[in-house]
Amino acid sequence: MLFSLTWLTSLLAGIVFAHITQRLCFPYFWKDLVYLIKVIRYGARLEFYKRTSKVLTVIDRFVQEARRSPNKPFLIYEGITYTYKEIDERSNKVAQVLDQYGAVKKGVTVALLMNNEPDFISVWFGLSKLGCAVAFLNTNIKSRSLLHCFNCCGAKLLVVGTDLLDSLEEILPNLQEDNISVWAMKKQISHPGVHTLLDKVEQASHEPVAAERRTVTSLKTATLYIFTSGTTGLPKAAVICHLQSLKAAGGLWAYGGTSEDVIYTPLPLYHTAASLIGIGGTIELGATCVLKKKFSASQFWNDCRKYDVTIFQYIGELCRYLCNQPEAENEKDHKVRMGVGNGLRPDVWKELHRRFGEIRMCEFYGSTEGNLCFMNHIGKIGAVGRCNFFYKLLLKYNLVQYDMVKDEIVRNEKGFCEHVKQGETGLLLCKINSQSPFFGYAGNKELTENKLLRNVFVKGDAYFNTGDLMVEDQEDFICFKDRVGDTFRWKGENVATTEVTELLGLLDFIQEANVYGVEVPGHEGRAGMAAVIVRPGCSFDGKKLFNITTAYLPSYARPLFIRIQETMEITGTFKQQKFRLVRSGFNPSTITDPLYFVDYNEQCYIPLTDSVYESIVSGQRKL
């Protein structure tokens, strides 16, 4: 009896000791383990598809869900509910029309230019049911950039939304000259050569086309092209295969989403976050999505209460806009339990919790075309992800030394990259292999090659260069620090500095331009700024500059600040020096060069005075 009691006491003491040791030395063990099991479970499913050549795609999952729960709300848009069955039948109608009248064949690429609305999804799904790859066009891009998108992806048919047809008027002759068929979601049309789609859809059968049309046998088959800005200036068509779309669709599930959730998506569907994670994630869960045509900070919480939203999607800017709204008594009166997105600054994260309650904010990191993803499944403020020991076995990534002043990767005497120490900032690279493939960009092998870094640690290896500076702390949390190269982020969009530079070069009074992004207090990302040299014999014309930037650049890409310089500093490898310009910012009290600021009321770039500067940093002027 005494022996049994002693044994039991020893066992209990051992359990308590092990528990205390685990809490002190491995505080995230159980959360890491649960997350790892989910990753392995989902990965096993994808591996099964690969080995059996029987791929269950996102559209297949949608059709399954429409049969399993036909009357369940799939989409809520502007107060109207659309069930899984209704969207399934609507997409069948689109497929029937484009199959009959558009002569769309399996494997071709079709471009889609629409704002957020139910028919965006119906057209997308209808084309997927025909076995087409769909190219999502950014609704902000214009003329030359838009034409470039067709050259990239090879689309010969365009479906355009009712409210965007007029924006194509300038390039319609070019599209018709290139034999690109244009279909508008309208019943009647005045534009010559443009086909009406809406009238034919309403008359079409809702019977499905043959399932064989959408069947794929390889996860590497392209299903989408999503355009992203890059160092070439013009948009690049990132190839999205079924492997990537299925991985993205599992994101909400990995964070703990269920079929009972209502997901609020105010982000544009032409981006990966809304389409693949939002819509794809809704389908994977069998949940409901509240789709917003455009984000509104003033309507956000009223929408959440009205539709019993439990999960919302965000980018960092979105959360800042919410926190900038006037405080109200019922701010914590909602059912939202989770936010999923990226770019959330620590100060905004804390303020969001203070104002709206302890919502679990699930940060993730990943680029549209990238071959890796980090997820902050713990919820540590300021981190974009966490890589425990087990996850590192699955994902081969490295942080390497980067010289910010020279704007180049550091290599040792043998020509290989050097690892940074834990806690130090380094450039994030991810090894390209069968588990983490890189599918590149459509239409240009050179662009794909430019994203690769070869001979990194050994001769012949290849890594995807994210262009992002990251730091991994002592607890294995990963934090984003900055971007390098010729791209920065503003208003939730990537801005390609080369595109802006080329446009500024068209002005007769600008001899040279160097475009970069600067931090603005209280704003996420970096605002566009250009250092320019005025051509001898000319003078700076703020009115002419305003006119050309507003005519040819989307709002997020227009430089907010201009700095007039006499000479342009370059690096030892004859690149334009950006680092010191970025660091010096736009404060007229510390910069002796003339500075200008874009004023939309004056429709001109005006002198950036101390008073204008103070109104910007204090938040009085909206950017």
Image (tube, grey):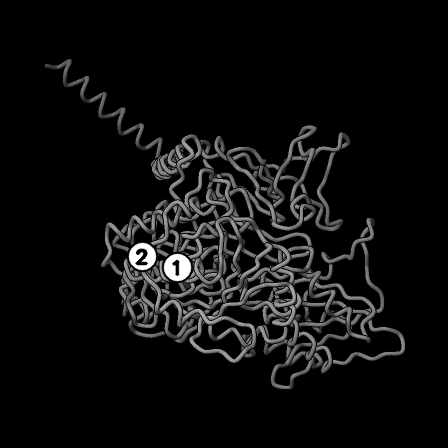
110 and 236: which one is in front?
A: 110
Q: Secondary structure at mark 1?
A: helix
Residue at image position (56%, 68%) is 140
Which is more N-terminal, label 2 or label 1?
1
**Relative to residue 434, is residue 577 depicted above or below?**
below
Residue found farthest to the left: 1
Residue at image position (61%, 50%) is 442
Residue at image position (39%, 75%) is 298
Q: Position of residue 150 (x, y in %)?
A: 61, 60
Residue behind mark 1? 96
Residue type, numbered disc 2: Glu
User: On the rendered structure, is 521 left or right of 24?
Assistant: right
Q: Secondary structure at mark 2?
A: loop
Residue found farthest to the right: 537
433 and 469: which one is in front?
A: 433
Pointers 1 and 2 in contact (CB under 8 A)? yes
Quarter holding the C terminus? bottom right
